[in-house]
Image (tube, coloured by chain):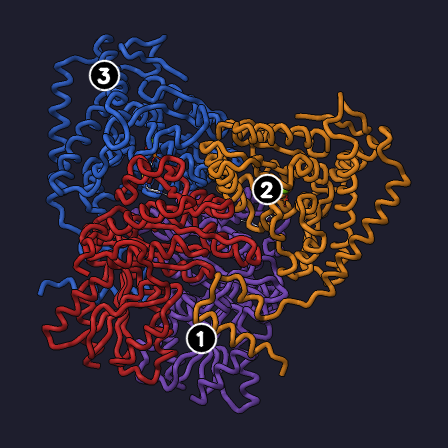
Chain colours: A red, B purple, C orange, D blue
Amino acid sequence: MSSEPELSILEAIRSALFDEMGRDERVMVLGMDVGQLGGVFRVTRGLMERFGPERVVDTPLAEGSIVGASLGLAIGGMVPVAEIQFLGFTHQAFHQIGPQLGRYRFRSRGRFNAQVTIRAPFGGGVRTPEFHPDAIEAQFAQEPGVKIVCPAFPDDAKGLLLEAIRDPDPVLYLEPQRLYRVIRGPVPAGDHTVPFGSSRLVREGKDVVLIAWSAAVHMCLAAADQLAQEGVAASVLDLRTLIPLDVAGLIAAVEKSGKAVVVHEAPLTGGFGAEIVATIQQEAFGSLDAPIRRVAARDTPYPPGSLEDYFLPTVARVVAAARATVEY
Amino acid sequence: MSSEPELSILEAIRSALFDEMGRDERVMVLGMDVGQLGGVFRVTRGLMERFGPERVVDTPLAEGSIVGASLGLAIGGMVPVAEIQFLGFTHQAFHQIGPQLGRYRFRSRGRFNAQVTIRAPFGGGVRTPEFHPDAIEAQFAQEPGVKIVCPAFPDDAKGLLLEAIRDPDPVLYLEPQRLYRVIRGPVPAGDHTVPFGSSRLVREGKDVVLIAWSAAVHMCLAAADQLAQEGVAASVLDLRTLIPLDVAGLIAAVEKSGKAVVVHEAPLTGGFGAEIVATIQQEAFGSLDAPIRRVAARDTPYPPGSLEDYFLPTVARVVAAARATVEY
Amino acid sequence: MQELLGVDGTVRGPSPMSPDQVVAALRLMLLSRAVDDRLIKLQRMGRVGVYGPVHGQEAAVIGSAMALDPQRDWIVPASREHPAMLRHGLPLKNMFATYMGNFDAAAVPAGVRLLPRQQSIGAQLPHAAGLAWALKLRRTPGVVAVYFGEGASSEGDFHEASNLAGVMRVPLVMLLINNHYAISTPLHRQTAAAQLAARAEGYGFPGFVVDGNDLLAVYAVTADAVSRALAGDGPTLIECLTYRMGFHNTSDNPKEYRDSAEVDEASQRDPIERVRRFAIREGMWSVAQEAAALEEIRSEIETAQRQVEELPRPGAAAIFEHVYETLSPRLQQQRAEALDEARPR
Amino acid sequence: MQELLGVDGTVRGPSPMSPDQVVAALRLMLLSRAVDDRLIKLQRMGRVGVYGPVHGQEAAVIGSAMALDPQRDWIVPASREHPAMLRHGLPLKNMFATYMGNFDAAAVPAGVRLLPRQQSIGAQLPHAAGLAWALKLRRTPGVVAVYFGEGASSEGDFHEASNLAGVMRVPLVMLLINNHYAISTPLHRQTAAAQLAARAEGYGFPGFVVDGNDLLAVYAVTADAVSRALAGDGPTLIECLTYRMGFHNTSDNPKEYRDSAEVDEASQRDPIERVRRFAIREGMWSVAQEAAALEEIRSEIETAQRQVEELPRPGAAAIFEHVYETLSPRLQQQRAEALDEARPR
Ligand SMILES: Cc1ncc(C[n+]2csc(CCOP(=O)(O)OP(=O)(O)O)c2C)c(N)n1
Ligand SMILES: Cc1ncc(C[n+]2csc(CCOP(=O)(O)OP(=O)(O)O)c2C)c(N)n1
Ligand SMILES: [Mg+2]
Ligand SMILES: [Mg+2]
């Protein structure tokens, strides 16, 4: 592994885009400001110079048409990677994502499929304005036909993005904006893909398992460090993809200790954590020794950056929930 | 009660609209085909003749502007009751419902509030075309600031609608299209309101509780009848509102038997049933004697009407799940 | 407004369509009316779910479709353009399967350049823009013709797709079928614009209004738009002014919102009668030919309907097909349960 | 394009604005520049989150706002129109609180006819249409002025709101601030339309293009639109052609996507310099007056900033305020937990 380059999550995403556009000339990138500027986070910087303005396209300011046109582009033989500037603005394209891209294979009985990747940064902790941090991934879990992917590490960022672009079905690829530059790690060179529906146990511990995805995984790792000092050994499970969900991996991780905490940045009520809890208690009821606690954002609108620490889950809340679960 | 008129759900909704528009001249109805035609289900029939074309308005075919304009109308002192022709088409207005109506009070720090009711029929079993039956209520549970109301009986249809129109915050009022004309019952005359966040135990039984909302409540009642013949006594809890959720009533109903089944018409994964299960196991872990089973639609796009019985939950599936839960 | 074919069947100047094309169009128009009648009958018998007739809009739908090359061009329909879909290569059997609830048999066959019907109003417009964009990027000769109603023109999707198509200068022909109604909503409640075609200027491409009940004019305007698109000159918006003679669909009753005088007046401009007069005057068509054509059409319809009736109905397994390319373990489990529950007991 | 005030400060014909109005506008323009400078400085010091300057757009924003009556009309802003908001009655302190992250202190005071800033591009347009509709329904004299950028004009919300406003014929003045950029996206990538004002015809109301760096022309065109709206003649679309002189916001660097020559050229058309020349020539303004005004402005800004700094910062409780009129039991429980966790340990 040491021979592998150390990349940030942002660099890993960019390198995957360079690789795949070089490998497959049908792949194109479209979205607001993705070309000349390289995107508001510079994720796509350099792509236009390298692949030209036909394959790296600055679009008008209209999310619905970015997503809807991507379906048409895919039917026409292209492989679009659409960027929505922030996940919160997928709401403007909501009627196109699930009901159109997600159902087109089904509606056409397999004649057409939407090989489209929708990339979008999301998540809090960086004092962004309203809408920009919204973690609304759970809303897409009710859109059968769509896959939801949320890497937390540079190697998965690359492996899951290559998998997403090559997946014949529409994939929502969620990028943890807070981690873009702060999390660095080794990234396998060359053609590295990570299959969907495979969770990853990123830390082993016998007392309790902390379950999360995207940026919350790192909050769980920090909590696990603190818990270790208290003598509590916590596992951390990174789901990596929500749809498809790795039910087997999830259950296996929970059965080790019979105790679990689910952590996410989205508001509590109706968050995907509820699905995780419901799935566990259905599949592993007998081995549960304590209620599964959820540590999530509050059921309020996202507040201004200066207040977001009161809104979001914190390491302290995760530690407290884990402690209460272990001591139950 | 016998002195009360027997009304269908549709008639109860219509009578509530007549009453409230008569009582409060700020109340107006807007949406596609709601005026001259009285709506595609004739729910608003007669309102235009009675209250005139300024207060009962046929709008252009654009859901986003129906909802967005309703916020402006509310700020301007009107009390809009907007009809979206079918809940599936709220996706076209998704960016206006949660992020705008749902957050406007918060954003303006109480200077403005969105006293808007959005009515929409939904649900399957009537062989409607694609999109028309979509049960996407869970997606709105991740939009803090919005309330979600789903009556299953004529008296609640009236009581919850009057409550919704008078509620100073935005309310999504979901109408079970399959039951519009088939469920009749007594409806209190005059000013009958039902507070949000109060569930209703519509059947008592000691062995297991079946939890549902909207049309699925009647599926549970039918299942309870069958179960009774097998000697299984099932309670049926009608949640009536999802946001706010009656946690206390839910827990009380579950603790009686320690066994519960949740039933909904939406696809399983990420449906609001997951929230119900997560809430119960968190609040009533100790008293649970069996895993809570969920009976829901499949995780596929909604199929054509001729196949919907394979997709939707059925009385048989509810009975089987209840039996397995009781025998656990 | 562009007009060529008078109500009396006389043409201004030379016909843009050859005699063969006119006869083919007339036959398709007659087929369309016969299909309307049959599917409405089947719906009344409970064998069809909901059906929205083409009645009155045949010239707009067929005149435009005749200007396309099925081997080269794509059609992106809304939900009331099945004559165009048939002309473009959809078998009549598949069309009947659509309405008789057999969605597997309804699929667009491989090789036919046609997207499925769209029931979310306006949602097909960005798809069409994207497909036309792909043709341009891949240097594939061809245009995309997208159909939508005047009601759809109020949706944000219309605006966003039109603006994008203008910026990318894609080979798109936008066929706005203005039949003056969106369910019960009349044109003047739908927009205050004098002409919807005027919106094209706001997107940087040309827009035209044409008498949508005039087969020849619709054909000519569409053919020009196709040539422009093929020459790389980008999109065109064509507003076909027509009238929805029948109900919105089989669950609608127009008497509730429009008076019959309006309908009677519109029936004076029936699109088929005009073509018939023209074709007979020009000696392309005769009463005898029409009788023969109607007989053929009747048996084609019989055959298509019977073929669908004889097909096995899709079962529980069908709802798990084409959800994703491969089913997740959870979906496999749901499928197993569904098949088990569906077994006759 | 409508123009009145030349770059050299000469006017074509009589000025539509009185000397007092011109001086008030000039002072507001100077305040706007000073606020830009201060908030950019505070952002660099880490005391402001993100700030998007008005630099270059002062005439478009202020000229239009001056044509409104704060006692009668409403303003529905996007996010770059705070001079208009100040003119309409938002205290400078509240404006500073907006950017200094104190949202309680940032609220629009009761009685001020102003909606909050909108950060979802285009989403305010249907709100404005609805508010104008309410004025009409309630027979309340007044108009609604809504601001949005040329980028916003690509969103479906622009289209749907415009069409609805046209059908309902509401008193709406749509101020399209075309500053030629949406972040890095230049106008020609945003639309192929020669003029965005041309879109008005497609909605059934008039549209005008005006030199957005010409205070007097913007004022005149807006005043006409206000009169039309008050007379019941419905909406007007006004495209103000201007240029974003600065960065999109403090996290943007325009050098990455546009060359300085373009900016230098635009700076020749600086909207403030024109008014200054005009006012001095007409004897309404002097170097001495300007020095005094700048001194006043400096201290007003000092005061506003200090007032915000001296305010208590909102705490955990604030995020549970104004979610709903009343908190559900679950939210009350979350609030209790949050307050408990926030207690210093
Ligand atoms: C997004 C959406 N909103 C509402 C509906 C319900 N609906 C079905 S057809 C129709 C009218 C469509 O009118 P138009 O676009 O003029 O087409 P036409 O029916 O006249 O052919 C409506 C409102 C829908 N199918 N999709
Ligand atoms: C719906 C939505 N999409 C994307 C963004 C990100 N964004 C913020 S400002 C902006 C550009 C807006 O351009 P324009 O409307 O011309 O206004 P200007 O910034 O020029 O004043 C974008 C794309 C957003 N805030 N909202
Ligand atoms: Mg129509
Ligand atoms: Mg701009």
Kindly report the distance in space between the C-alpha atoms of the residues bearing marks 3 and 1.
70 Å
Vertical placement of C48 versus C344: above or below? above
Marks 2 & 1, CB-CB < 8 Å contact: no
In the image, which is nearer the foreground, mark 2 or mark 1? Answer: 2
The 10 Å Cα crowd at callout 2, few under 14, some 14 to 19, many 20 or more, is many
On the picture, is D5 further left or further right than C176? Answer: left
Residue type at mark 3: give it: Glu
Q: Is residue C310 left or right of residue D249?
A: right
Q: In the rendering, at what x and y percent does residue A130 appear? A: 29, 48
How far apart are labels 2 and 1 at the CA level? Answer: 44 Å
Q: Is residue C76 left or right of residue B66?
A: right
Chain bearing tag 1 is: B
Please, which chain is the residue tagged with disc 2 on? C
Indicate the quadrant where residue A212 lies: bottom left
Mark seen at residue B294: 1
- The residue wearing badge 3 is D273
**Secondary structure found at label 1:** strand
Give the residue at x 46% y 45%. Answer: A78
Q: Which mark is residue C74?
A: 2
